[in-house]
Image: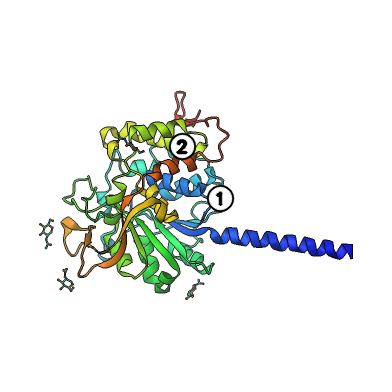
């Protein structure tokens, strides 16, 4: 009799443990991150890795934005190794904008708007040198020709769960558009696509020598792809410059990050931003929490967004007007209905610091910086 009670009790414990486990994992928001692996993407992903309410199912890299596909892929693998997360699948996606593929002009039309040195693709490819601070990811990681590409990996994730999966799009929309065009059923399996980019009522941010004052880089990286996503019927949340332009990383904030380097990742982010500040000079005065803020909106829109409006948007594509191409234009007649974040909540600044410093033992971590003795960047 005693034995039986014990067995019942033990079984109950096991059942309880499983139940608790199931609820806690159910509460997690499942997300696929699609990224062009630039500096602000890295900060956004590090933040999400610190959140226990987010389950990152896969990271797909898109080559139509700032980082080259191969460098971006390697850096994401190594960053995950740095965070002890070699369990997260990573793969490659599109390397050319849809327009360029259609017209056989590979890589030219929009890729050329990514600036050359200094400050352009090289900085994204190397994370201004700080990619060297990450360890090597090791065997079983990196590019594998037999591994599924971005679209196939996204399909695997969407089909592996009954819950809807959100997509956080931190670069041009190429991979998301490819998914929706190859697998139209996917749109009902996706909760929301949160797209970091666009510029609705404000001007764009293209500072390279092209006569376009309307577009934002992620939208311009593949305008046809963003247009396809917007018109697909998937639930799209745009996190445009209207909102992110209000989240500039100023000196006061940088100093706060500086005194909160309690984890290696917080120290890495501080070194990254300090290096950017040194290299960019006064241009750094426009550096904003672009992708980290889009990540925040994905995590908890009601906490981080003060104004979100449903707006009918048309994404201007090459065929319409080259000087406006990539523009996310309000268009009440023909536009697609999109949720647009117009005003951010400042609490994002505090939360980013809080999460990066989490699990600290309250003594500052070593910093990965330019080293005096030989090595370019090292932990010291
Ligand atoms: C994924 O699910 C869709 C919709 O149910 C189905 O059409 C497709 O064949 C599935 N794909 C895989 C690879 O399981
Ligand atoms: C700097 O940014 C913080 C948010 O981190 C903001 O509260 C403050 O007003 C800004 N300071 C200046 C001088 O713009
Ligand atoms: C194209 O854009 C330019 C600059 O905004 C504008 O002046 C012109 O009217 C536009 N053309 C068309 C056909 O929409
Ligand atoms: C809406 O689309 C139709 C058909 O493509 C076009 O004729 C019309 O000019 C568009 N209206 C606006 C306001 O863009």
Q: Residue 198 — which label?
A: none
Few, some or many C-alpha atoms within 10 Å of disc 1 (few <14, some 14-19, many ≥20)? some
Residue 62, quarter of picture: bottom left
Q: Secondary structure at mark 1?
A: loop
Left or right of residue 339: residue 332: left
Q: Residue at x 40, y 54 (%)?
A: 297
Residue 332, quarter of picture: bottom left
Q: Nearer the viewer, residue 32 or 86?
A: 32
Indicate whether 121 appears above or below 267: below
For residue 63, say whether it is visible: yes
Total numbered circles: 2
Residue 10, quarter of picture: bottom right
State the image coordinates of residue 54 (x, y, percent, origin top left).
Answer: 51, 54
* Alpha carbon distance from label 1 to label 2: 19 Å
Q: Secondary structure at mark 2?
A: helix
State the image coordinates of residue 12 (x, y, percent, origin top left).
Answer: 74, 63
For residue 98, say whether it is visible: no
Q: Which residue is situated farthest in the top direction here?
A: 373
Q: Upstream in the sequence, badge 1 or badge 2?
A: 1
Q: Which residue is mark 1?
A: 86
Indicate whether 100 appears above or below 291: below
State the image coordinates of residue 48 (x, y, percent, origin top left).
Answer: 47, 49
Q: Nearer the viewer, residue 65 or 333?
A: 333
State the image coordinates of residue 203 (x, y, percent, origin top left).
Answer: 20, 50
Q: Residue 268 — which label?
A: 2
Q: Residue at x 60, y 61 (%)?
A: 23
From the viewer's perspective, is the residue at label 1 or at label 2 nearer? 2
Q: Are marks 1 and 2 in contact (CB under 8 Å)?
A: no
Q: Quadrant of ligand 3?
A: bottom left
Q: Residue at x 54, y 51 (%)?
A: 52
């Amino acid at each position: 009799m005693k034995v039986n009670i014990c067995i019942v009790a033990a079984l109950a414990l096991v059942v309880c443990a499983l139940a608790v486990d199931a609820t806690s994992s159910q509460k997690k928001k499942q997300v696929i991150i699609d990224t062009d692996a630039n500096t602000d993407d890295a900060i956004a992903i590090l933040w999400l890795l610190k959140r226990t309410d987010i389950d990152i199912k896969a990271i797909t890299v898109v080559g139509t934005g700032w980082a080259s596909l191969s460098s971006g892929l390697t850096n994401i693998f190594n960053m995950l190794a740095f965070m002890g997360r070699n369990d997260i699948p990573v793969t490659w996606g599109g390397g050319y904008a849809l327009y360029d593929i259609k017209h056989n002009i590979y890589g030219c039309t929009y890729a050329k708007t990514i600036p050359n040195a200094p400050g352009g693709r090289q900085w994204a490819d190397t994370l201004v040198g700080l990619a060297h601070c990450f360890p090597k990811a090791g065997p079983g990681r990196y590019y594998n020709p037999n591994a599924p590409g971005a679209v196939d990996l996204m399909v695997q994730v969407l089909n592996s769960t009954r819950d809807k999966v959100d997509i956080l799009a931190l670069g041009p929309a190429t991979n998301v558009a490819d998914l929706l065009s190859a697998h139209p059923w996917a749109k009902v399996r996706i909760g929301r696509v949160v797209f970091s980019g666009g510029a609705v009522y404000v001007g764009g941010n293209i500072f390279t020598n092209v006569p376009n004052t309307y577009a934002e880089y992620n939208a311009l990286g593949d305008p046809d792809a963003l247009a396809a996503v917007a018109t697909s019927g998937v639930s799209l949340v745009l996190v445009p410059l209207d909102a992110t332009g209000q989240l500039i990383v100023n000196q006061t904030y940088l100093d706060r990050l500086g005194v909160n380097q309690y984890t290696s990742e917080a120290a890495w982010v501080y070194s990254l931003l300090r290096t950017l500040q040194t290299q960019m000079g006064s241009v750094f005065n426009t550096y904003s929490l672009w992708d980290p803020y889009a990540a925040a909106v994905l995590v908890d829109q009601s906490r981080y967004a003060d104004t979100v409006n449903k707006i009918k948007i048309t994404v201007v594509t090459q065929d319409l007007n080259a000087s406006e191409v990539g523009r996310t234009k309000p268009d009440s007649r023909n536009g697609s209905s999109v949720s647009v974040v117009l005003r951010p909540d400042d609490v994002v600044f505090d939360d980013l610091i809080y999460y990066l410093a989490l699990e600290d033992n309250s003594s500052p971590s070593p910093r990965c910086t330019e080293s005096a003795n030989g090595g370019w960047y090292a932990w010291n």
